[in-house]
Image (tube, rainbow, N blue to C red):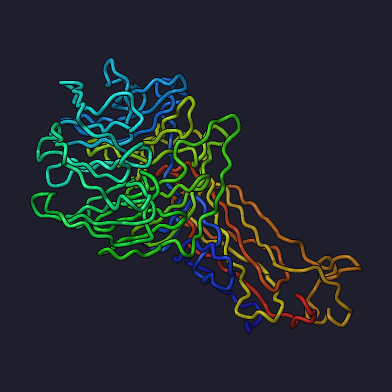
């Protein structure tokens, strides 16, 4: 039981997001809402990086997604591919995300997989593409490769290009095909491996892991291992129930692989599959913006620096590799664009550090978005709106679930120069106390603190206070919220805004609450 006027510290919230349905399973250091914030290594919650629309409503790349990038000399290139509303297939390149040039020559073709190898970019034709694969470089241009197999994913491993057929393949959709060593233009008629072809699943994605190939089917995972010749390879199933059902759902960060199977993200370490979002069950929200076409990609995994970006239909969940915590990111460019409109992020190579690009996820005029995983010093990269960041704590009972408590005031320790909003919400059911029950206050309730005659001690469902920013971003400040409340359980909300720049840092460190124990619960239901 807390003593009179005891000041309690809430936070730091080093546990990140916890969306468990059982409120008792949420730890004091976890949050039930953590939007547009991420845990920093020193324990504070900092605002997410901003993103900017670098190209707005570009009909040239209508229906495209960004499929890869490459570096030639000191020039970095992005590559997009798709089919526009008129049915025209094209592959295009860009050095800035704004101007896009067709590189597929006179032949229509499109791709969802490409890779750079030996000073060329190799494009694997989509199974539904009019024409086959090709290679390209800025000087020599396009070289058609009619013999290259079509597919949905590819990697280069031990000097060979491997292609997964994917679920769009009409025949042999569980086939893995490989080129001759160091010659990606030569494909032998027998250079393929059928991965468990009788199980009715397609071979959808592939990763190089521990000098072997991880092969992902709809609901199983296999490993292919060999030393010199794939003909001598050993194919082994390492998980009979977990896989990926489409491309763009597997990534690798350092020595760990991550995959999205249904609504669960698995971390693969030494071929052990460990779910990492048990406390953050993904919410299925299939809504799309008005007057738009269905999504090109329903869900995907991609990287942004040391973060795992998981887009699950209309939701985007972000996992920090360093802190092992989750948060949720939302767009502030409403209604023009939303996070769930983005295709997987693609990193521009090292000549442009920290730049990631994505496109709009609908078959219509296409926006191109850019983000950085580094602090943004260039004001031109800040977008057109503010980032609204907020947290909501668990329902605290202050380790005393059988007594009502009085909140005298609470505070938030933050770093910002913009507006700050704080809200405290007691979890109560309306009650009508007797005169004797007023004694729980110890005689310290003022007349104006009482409610109506029918419900003297009723309290508002929440109380909200806003402070106007002082434009001083150099020091952390404590904002004190003075409204008193009577509660058995209570949660707190803090909202900050920022433009994401270095000159407008936004951080939340911790909360404090000054409370005093009052009467024990007297109703059957409280």
Please identify the quarter of the rendering in which residue 511 is found.
bottom right
**Furthest residue to the front?**
198
**Which percent across, then down, holds residue 268?**
31, 61
88 over 188 or under it: above or below: above
Q: Nearer the viewer, residue 400 or 341?
A: 341
* Figure quadrant of the N terminus: bottom right
Q: Residue at x 23, y 37 (%)?
A: 115
Q: Nearer the viewer, residue 143 or 355?
A: 143
Indicate left or right for 184 with 361 as reference: left
Q: Residue at x 47, y 66 (%)?
A: 12
Q: Nearer the viewer, residue 18 or 407?
A: 18
Q: Residue at x 52, y 71 (%)?
A: 28
Tell me if I can see residue 471 in this picture: no
Q: Nearer the viewer, residue 44 or 362?
A: 362
**Which percent across, then down, holds residue 159?**
12, 43
Tell me if I can see residue 269 in this picture: yes
Please identify the quarter of the rendering in which residue 235 is found.
bottom left
**Which percent across, then down, holds residue 312?**
48, 48
Q: Residue at x 49, y 69 (%)?
A: 29
* Figure quadrant of the C terminus: bottom right
**Which percent across, then down, holds residue 301?**
38, 48
230 over 273 or under it: above or below: above
């Amino acid at each position: 039981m807390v003593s009179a006027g005891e000041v309690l510290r809430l936070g730091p919230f080093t546990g990140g997001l916890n969306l468990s349905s059982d409120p008792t399973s949420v730890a004091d250091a976890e949050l039930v809402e953590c939007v547009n914030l991420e845990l920093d290594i020193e324990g504070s919650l900092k605002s997410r990086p901003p993103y900017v629309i670098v190209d707005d409503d570009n009909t040239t790349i209508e229906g495209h997604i960004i499929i890869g990038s490459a570096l030639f000399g000191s020039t970095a290139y992005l590559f997009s591919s798709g089919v526009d509303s008129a049915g025209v297939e094209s592959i295009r390149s860009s050095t800035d995300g704004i101007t896009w040039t067709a590189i597929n020559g006179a032949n229509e073709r499109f791709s969802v997989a490409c890779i750079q190898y030996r000073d060329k970019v190799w494009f694997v034709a989509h199974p539904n593409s009019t024409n086959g694969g090709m290679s390209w470089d800025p000087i020599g241009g396009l070289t058609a490769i009619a013999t290259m197999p079509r597919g949905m994913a590819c990697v280069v491993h031990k000097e060979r290009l491997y292609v997964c057929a994917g679920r769009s393949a009409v025949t042999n959709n569980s086939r893995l095909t490989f080129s001759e060593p160091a010659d990606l233009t030569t494909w032998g008629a027998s250079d393929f491996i059928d991965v468990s072809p009788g199980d009715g699943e397609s071979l959808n994605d592939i990763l190089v892991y521990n000098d072997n190939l991880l092969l992902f089917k709809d609901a199983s995972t296999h490993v292919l291992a060999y030393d010199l010749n794939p003909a001598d390879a050993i194919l082994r199933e390492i998980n009979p129930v977990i896989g990926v059902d489409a491309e763009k759902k597997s990534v690798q960060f350092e020595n760990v692989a991550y995959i999205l199977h249904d609504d669960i993200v698995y971390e693969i370490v030494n071929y052990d599959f460990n779910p990492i979002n048990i406390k953050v069950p993904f919410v299925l929200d299939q809504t799309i913006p008005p007057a738009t076409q269905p999504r090109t990609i329903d869900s995907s995994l991609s990287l942004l620096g040391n973060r795992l970006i998981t887009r699950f239909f209309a939701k985007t969940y972000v996992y920090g590799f360093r802190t092992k915590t989750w948060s949720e990111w939302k767009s502030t460019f409403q209604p023009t664009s939303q996070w769930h409109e983005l295709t997987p992020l693609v990193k521009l190579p090292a000549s442009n550090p920290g730049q990631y690009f994505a496109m709009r996820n609908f078959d219509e005029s296409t926006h191109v978005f850019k983000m950085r995983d580094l602090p943004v010093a260039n004001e031109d990269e800040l977008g057109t709106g503010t980032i609204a960041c907020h947290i909501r704590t668990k329902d605290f009972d202050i380790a005393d679930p059988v007594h009502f408590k009085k909140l005298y005031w609470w505070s938030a320790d933050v770093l910002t120069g913009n507006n700050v909003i704080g809200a405290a919400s007691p979890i109560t059911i309306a009650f009508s106390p007797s005169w004797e029950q007023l004694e729980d206050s110890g005689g310290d309730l003022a007349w104006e603190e009482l409610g109506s005659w029918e419900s003297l001690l009723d309290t508002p469902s929440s109380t909200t206070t806003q402070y106007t920013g002082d434009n001083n971003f150099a020091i952390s400040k404590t904002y004190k919220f003075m409204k008193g409340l009577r509660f058995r359980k209570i949660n707190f909300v803090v909202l900050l805004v920022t433009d994401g720049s270095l000159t407008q840092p936004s951080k939340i460190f911790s909360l404090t609450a000054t409370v005093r124990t009052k009467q024990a619960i007297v109703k059957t239901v409280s």
